[in-house]
Image (cartoon, coloured by chain):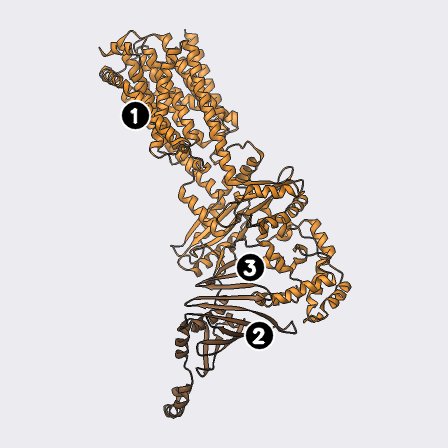
Chain colours: A orange, B brown
Amino acid sequence: MKNTRLLALSLWILSLAVCGLIIARTQFVADMSAFLPKAPNARQQMLVEQLRDGIIARLIMVGIEADSAAERARLSEALAQSLRSDPAFVGVQNGSEETLARDQAYYFDNRYLLSPTVTAERFSSAGLKDAIGASIEALSGSAGLMLKKLLPRDPTGETLALIEQFGSGEQPRNLEGVWASRDGKRALLLVQTRAAGSDIDAQAAAITRIQQVFTQLPERRADARLLLTGAGVFSVSSRQLIEGEVSKLAGASILLVVCLLLAIYRSPRLLVLGLLPVFSGALAGIAAVSLGFGSIHGLTLGFGTTLIGEAVDYSIYLFIQRADTGDARGFWRTIRLGVLTSIAGFAVLLFSGFPGLAQLGLYSISGLIAAALVTRFVLPQLMPAQLRLRDLSGFSQSLSNWATRLQRLKLGVPVLLIAALALLVWRGDSVWNRELGALSPVPAADQQLDAELRGDMGAPEMRYMLVLKAANAEQALQAAEKLAPPLRELTQAGVIAGFTSPANVLPSQASQAERRAALPPEEGLRMRLREALAGMPIQAERLEGFVADIAKARAAAPLSRASLDGTSSALLVDSLLVPRANDVLVMLPLRAPANSEIDAAKVEQRLADANLPASTFVDIKHESFGLYATYLHEAAVLAGLGGLAIILILFASLRALGRTLRIFAPLACAVLCVAAGLVATGTSLTILHLVGLLLVIAVGSNYALFFDQNTLQPNEAARQQTLVSLCVANLTTVSSFGVLACSQVPVLSAIGLTVGPGAFLALVFAAMLAPRTARSQTAR
Amino acid sequence: MRLTRHHPLIAALALSCALPAMAADVQLADLMQLLAQTKSAKATFVEKKYIGIVDTPVESSGELTFTAPDKLEKRTLKPKAEALILDGTALTVDMAGKRRTIRLQDYPEVAAFVESIRGTLAGDRSALEKTYKLDLTGSREKWQLVLTPTQARMSKIITRIRMQGAQADIRSIDFDQADGDRSEMVVTNVSP
């Protein structure tokens, strides 16, 4: 006996030490990635990757509010100047003339390498005649004032051809020389961080830096406001939110449980003993997740607070039910079955596509096992030989009466069930929330600001894209160039409103070489010009600038990504041409026609007709819908399997179908009523609610099991003790999930709102549906 | 008129002599009032641009439509179709099948430019005087209004706008550009 005690205690302490060691080396993360699912198909994988690591994740959109446009412009300029010299930022754009001038210089200086209309034909005598004739004609139009300045150096109108290539891509408004929002009330800047979007520490530092610089701007009035948004900003703010929430939730949860236990036990010693399984479980859970996943997510810890409510139950059962030694073997069997059913429920989470849910599953399983083991083998060694609990007979008597009263309402259960079912069936598919964003911890107001600034920025709308892969950047650009003609046709046909291609600003080396080869040498050019200008109202000597520019273009070094430095096109190329480990990803954003969507079938049809490099049409909204639908389906299947596993475990251990169903019935009732309740109160159900319903079964099975076991208990006092322990255990569970329900993180509150009421209802229904024979004895 | 400020006597003399002539001369306020009565007008135009680098003037033609108080359309039909539609503060350019709308307040130079024509058509003196100095000569039957930009950034582009007309009809609009180029637009009213 003494040896067993020693063995149990030393094993326990050793395990705790090992867990402690592992935890000391554990990395805690709190970004949103755990709740961005692992994508099942390549296209969705690409999407998720881009959201997480692409350049889009490195952009911070900045809005400045101040009382006058001039003041906003001044602040915008000052902020941009200061950030440009900061190594934390790769690019800062605010629409200033400086960048504008650099952009214009890039296009104008390199027009003969950039323009798609540069061909040998165009530079023949006849081609020059046509092109120059068209340019002179264009002078009559309203753009004449600008064109006449270009004509001497660009008589073939290549600059115009370049402008047309960009189409009507929206630019932000320009007020007082800087970008402004559409309503003109904010100045806008676009900042690109050097650090990756997934490096949240660096993102947080970058954000702090911007805020610091802004507050230190000279003569800034106190009412000037800085607004920041973007993927990185969201990651940082959700991490802050999650970190803050987790410690708050854990604190509140522990406090509540401690108060409850003190109220019941009135013994600090029992309180400490009761919490031992909880802390052992938490340590084991964190260590297991750390080993299994390499790091643990803050949200997992947040969920983990609910483990407090669940793990403390075992010690409650132990202290209260065994206060007067009852049927020890029956007691432990019930505990074991309860642990098994809970584990079955959590185990299915391991297979979830959401890394966060899988972590939660592992955390809960290992935590529960550890808590149960400590309760079974360690607590009995530390418990005082004579447990002196305060007299709970008054409490248990009234509970007993309540249980009896509840039983009389048994007939109401089918009515309630029918109502719940009717509501769910009537609402049908609409009970589900199909937006991936529903899981986002970013508050709606921030999402609104993001949408506003994005719209103001006129950033290429990243909803529709053509995506393709190539072995290297050159091949990628060539592929993008091959896609341009069919896309232009689609634009003409009105299927799309336009497209953006990185090859527009950085043509492939092959195209550049081809265009360069089309430019005639100086002597030849002069001769052709003489022929072309015969009978035209323009003298050859006026076009000396043109001759000189062609000679320059023929000798110029080919354009590369480095040539774009300092222009706004650098950002465009970097975001649309993404080098990866083994290949290069190219994205061509497509613009939808005004007020309508792009007909995917038509685009795919047109691209399939031509013999073109393989590309994929992606509609991000559609994809994220699809992604979410996949996971909703997955969660439904998993929850179903979990429920089934619990029934099978019950059946295997009880070996009686009737009894199994009797235990399961209250759980099913609780699940239906909670689901109906959520729907009735206007909540649309997400994956997390679905998972919560599974947890209702997993957690609630304990109550049903003990109620069932109680019917076999001949001793009335023991039956009442069991009832008390169930109530206390239920209170701790409901309160810890209740705390979760108050969270501002939607993922946490969804689970809390589902499991809290669900656990309570499971107990109530278990009491209502308990077999009459035993209960009527109690009442007597 | 300058005399009045310097020498009351001469001014009085001048005034008494000038009185008969003044009856025939048109006053700016009168002209503006006259123009303001036009609620809508439609005209054809022929515009010739004299551009330094090109030896012969470049010609274009089309229609002008004005609807009070602030809608002006210039539709060029030859040699290439394009349209400029000015409606309130929005200027829409329709060129080669592409349509683009800009807000005038974002482009002060363009605003000043188009306001010269619209302001005249609408008889909106205060709008015109924001950016131009106005000089009116001639009679009601044959007047000439010269608009000279008062702001430096405008006069870097346009040095003078000259409009000629009879009664409420504008007959020609000439622009002199700072670089020496100029354009002449002959306007012929079409009875609505």
Q: Which mark is residue A98?
A: 3
Place of residue B101 in the rendered image (x, y in percent of width and height, measured from the top left): 50, 59
At label 1, the amino acid type is Cys
Seen as rendered, the residue at the extreme front is B191
Asked if residue A501 can be seen in this view, the reply is no
Of residues A748 and A138, the one drawn nearer to the viewer in this rendering: A138
The residue indicated by pointer 1 is A259
Q: Which mark is residue B182?
A: 2
Relative to A71, is A621 above or below? above
Position of A598 with respect to A393 (left or right) is right
Q: Residues within 10 Å of mark 1 (few under 14, many from 20)?
A: some
Name the residue: 70% across, 49% down.
A509
Separation of marks 1 and 2 at Cα, in angstroms: 90 Å
Specify the subunit that label 2 lies on: B
Place of residue A519 in the rendered image (x, y in percent of width and height, measured from the top left): 73, 58
Same chain for the residues under marks 3 and 1 in the image: yes
At label 3, the amino acid type is Glu
Q: Secondary structure at mark 1?
A: helix
Separation of marks 3 and 1 at Cα, in angstroms: 65 Å
Relative to A464, is A555 above or below? below
Pick whichever of labels 3 and 1 is earlier in the sequence: 3
Q: Nearer the viewer, mark 1 or mark 2?
A: 2
Res. B119 image quadrant: bottom left
Of residues B152 and B172, the one drawn nearer to the viewer in this rendering: B172
Specify the subunit that label 1 lies on: A
At label 2, the amino acid type is Arg
Of residues B111 and B21, the one drawn nearer to the viewer in this rendering: B21
Q: Nearer the viewer, mark 2 or mark 3?
A: 2
Q: Secondary structure at mark 2?
A: strand
